[in-house]
Amino acid sequence: MDKVVSLCKRRGFIFPGSEIYGGLANTWDYGPYGTALKNNVKKAWWQTFVDSRDDVVGLDSAIFMNSKVWEASGHLGAFSDPLIDCKKCKERFRGDKLIEENLNLDAAIGLDLAGVTKVIKDNKIACPACKATDFTEARNFNLMFKTHQGVVEEAQTAVYLRPETAQGIFVNFKNVVNTSRKKLPFGIAQIGKAFRNEITPGNFTFRTREFEQMEIEYFFKPDDNETKTIFDKWSKDMYEWFLNLGVNKQNLRMRDHDQDELSHYSSMTQDVEYNFPFGWGELAGLAFRGKFDLTQHEKFSKQDLKYQDPITNEKFIPHVIEPSFGADRTVLTFLVEAYEEQQLEDGETRVVMHFHPKLAPIKAAILPLMKKPELTEKAREVYDILKNKFVCEYDESGHIGKRYRRQDEIGTPFCLTIDYDTLEKDNCVTVRDRDSMKQERIKIDEISDYLLLKLDK
């Protein structure tokens, strides 16, 4: 993981937040290539789960919402983690995470506060910071960031940074039905920021207090016979989306939640997990939420949120299945999956990022063999031909071998080199494949079609 973090800083994927001021713990800024990579991930997700389907529409709801939303959803009363303090060094930790890391995942499932305290004490779990074994009793810590709307900090002005994007979808359910005229079953998709005041964020961008979600709420008529079918179809689609973008199936798994691990509103949940350098971690979740959310919002808002079947005129609260992806964790997955160090025949080591072409920040790099006017002029001509069709980069600085290495490290699938044969013989460029390093000569007037074919995988 340290090598991936180093590459991200060195090549402009991800920088530490507020770095010139000493940083701010567990905040990260996406650099030029990281921004492009993340945008490509979101674009690929939207294309697969929204644009290519006729049963899913989009939404972009506000981050700030009426506090009643969080009361109805249960976040105000129950959205908390078991917080413990080390009495020696005063560091704070999530008790359940300490148990998971020191014992096993199952050991923390279903424990109440007293149970967390007892397991930590009985097993003499040590503080990760100072190795002491003297902790306070576990207590609830609400994960929502609280602020105030307006100029006076009074109780009635309290608002929260949303801890999830899902509730923005639920409160707009009737608006979407009335304006899109979608019939069940259908989904509402949203990509947006969410915020959780995590006690122990860490593992680079895997767990942060500010993150982005890619989420769908899929509504359908309550039917026990259809629920499992719909759930299994979404499970398959989620799993295959990662495989289709280059994730090795050996590093990917679907894990069913045990009965005592399920959220109170869910009777069926799966996690898509990836084998990170620090172990298996959740990338995405699939939950059957039943009719909990719409029922709660109908109760608290006093508004009718029932769906009326246009054929039978029957009115009912739909059931919901929620496919939810973490955008930042997904980007981290593709970074880890793409990273490889290769030993070359000359004894050198090549670092290469094997991004799927759809995700690569730069699709093609145009490189004059040397920084000579006649070569750079021709290279600029090729760049001008391609830049409106592909995300390209022009680079003339340094030895050609070092420029190849740089493009390997940012995951550019193809490098196009302009040399003196281009000018004097064949009007061709040398196309170098990132993964195989094989080279072939392609005529300049054919290069657009060549790239289109190679990049459309």
Image: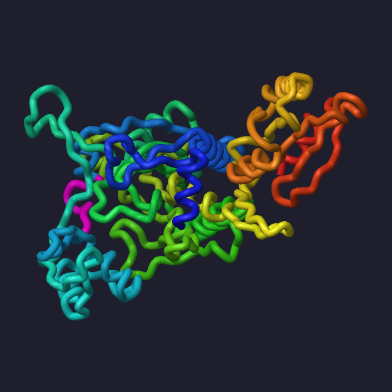
The one of 450 and 254 positioned closer to us in this rendering: 450
Residue at 60% x, 52% y: name it.
351
Residue 335 appears at what percent x and percent y?
53, 50
- Rendering quarter of residue 100: bottom left
Q: Can you name the residue that lies furthest to the right here? A: 425
Residue at 49% x, 52% y: name it.
4
Residue 432 appears at what percent x and percent y?
76, 42
Q: Is residue 402 above or below residue 350?
A: above
The one of 420 and 5 positioned closer to us in this rendering: 420
* Magenta extent: 73-81
| Rendering colour mode | rainbow
Q: Is residue 151 above or below residue 362?
A: above
Q: Is residue 76 magenta?
A: yes
Q: In this orientation, does residue 286 appear?
A: yes
Residue at 23% x, 54% y: name it.
199
Q: Is residue 303 left or right of residue 450?
A: left
The one of 310 and 211 positioned closer to us in this rendering: 211
- Label total for image: 0
The one of 4 and 35 positioned closer to us in this rendering: 4
Q: Is residue 183 magenta?
A: no
For the C terminus, the image quarter is top right
Residue 357 appears at what percent x and percent y?
66, 42
Q: In this orientation, does residue 358 appear?
A: no
Residue at 38% x, 55% y: name it.
203
Q: Is residue 221 left or right of residue 43?
A: left
Residue 182 appears at what percent x and percent y?
50, 34
- Rendering quarter of residue 449: top right
Q: Is residue 428 above or below residue 324?
A: above
